[in-house]
Amino acid sequence: MKKAILYVLLFVAIQVVVMNVVEGVCLLIGSTSVVVDKTTQMIIGLSAANILALVVFLWKRMTPLSPSWLLTRPWSVLLWTAVASLGMAIPFTWLQEHLPELPNLIEIEMGNLMANYWGYVVIGLLAPLVEEVVFRGAVLRVLLEKLTPWKAIAVSALLFSLVHGNPAQMPYAFIGGLLLGWMYWRTGSIIPGMVYHWVNNSAAYIVSNMYQQADVKLVDIFGSEQHALMAAGFSLMIVIPALWQLYLQMKRADSQN
């Protein structure tokens, strides 16, 4: 448990230090009449922080990597993972919209990040890779050594939601963390989580740019609350078979020999 918390603190420290260094450098550059806008500064800072975290966690083997699971050719698992991720988007969003409203501390910053093409590098590429390396490959891995599987998954999901630092994102991050943790526990690999995470974040980025806003509501997309509810119900008809197939097919590499 202590090691898992230390991993989380290390990840947060890297984010804070790098973002502050980038801000300082941008202020220094600004004094020479070359102004770096806040969105570009955020993209540079988050990219640098995520890359550094990735290097540190892999270099120090806090997240050991192995191709064993991928060598089992689990293509159907990855396909069902992508289907589950797409199917979960609407029901998760509907649930979040009907929970008590929580403060969105980074609404403007997230909107600007989503509206920037380079923002996809952070949201769609680096975040799925680095967060799975840290929170499933490192944090959950060590928790599974000390706790029962579902306790370990719940604790890792809680830590994952808290690290987002934004109350409005925490419920979604917690529920997603449970599912991502389950995938890691069943397979011993971060790859299914990366696929799920990438599809989810990419879909959010695409929808945000289609409607030119980060906080677009389902009613804006489907025209009415009734249609939004119908869409959520239809999505569940996709999610349930996808999760059932994952339950049947997901196995660790060492159990397939």
Image: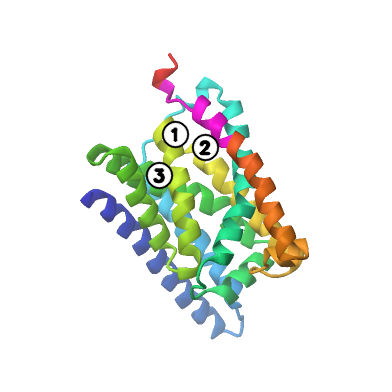
Q: Which residue is mark 1?
A: 189
Q: Is residue 250 magenta-colored?
A: yes
The residue sitting at 39% across, 35% down in the picture is: 185
Image coords of residue 211 (percent x, y): 75, 66
- Which segment did they paint magenta? 242-253
Quarter of the view holding residue 108? bottom right
**Which of the 4 image quarters holds residue 24?**
bottom left
Q: Can residue 151 be spotted in the picture?
A: yes
* Helix, strand or loop status at disc 3: helix
Give percent across and percent down for residue 1.
23, 49
Mark 3 residue crowding within 10 angstroms, few (<14) / some (14–19) / many (20+): many
Label ID, residue 136: 3
Task: Specify whether residue 205 is painted magenta.
Answer: no
Check residue 29 in the rendering and tell me which mark sits there, or answer none.
Answer: none
Q: Residue at x 66, y 49 (%)?
A: 233
SS at badge 1: loop
* Residue in the foreground of this view, choosing between 254 and 182: 182
Question: Residue 209: horizontal and vertical position, in percent?
Answer: 72, 63
Examine the rendered structure and indicate whether residue 233 appears above or below residue 244.
below
Q: Earlier in the sequence, mark 2 or mark 3?
A: 3
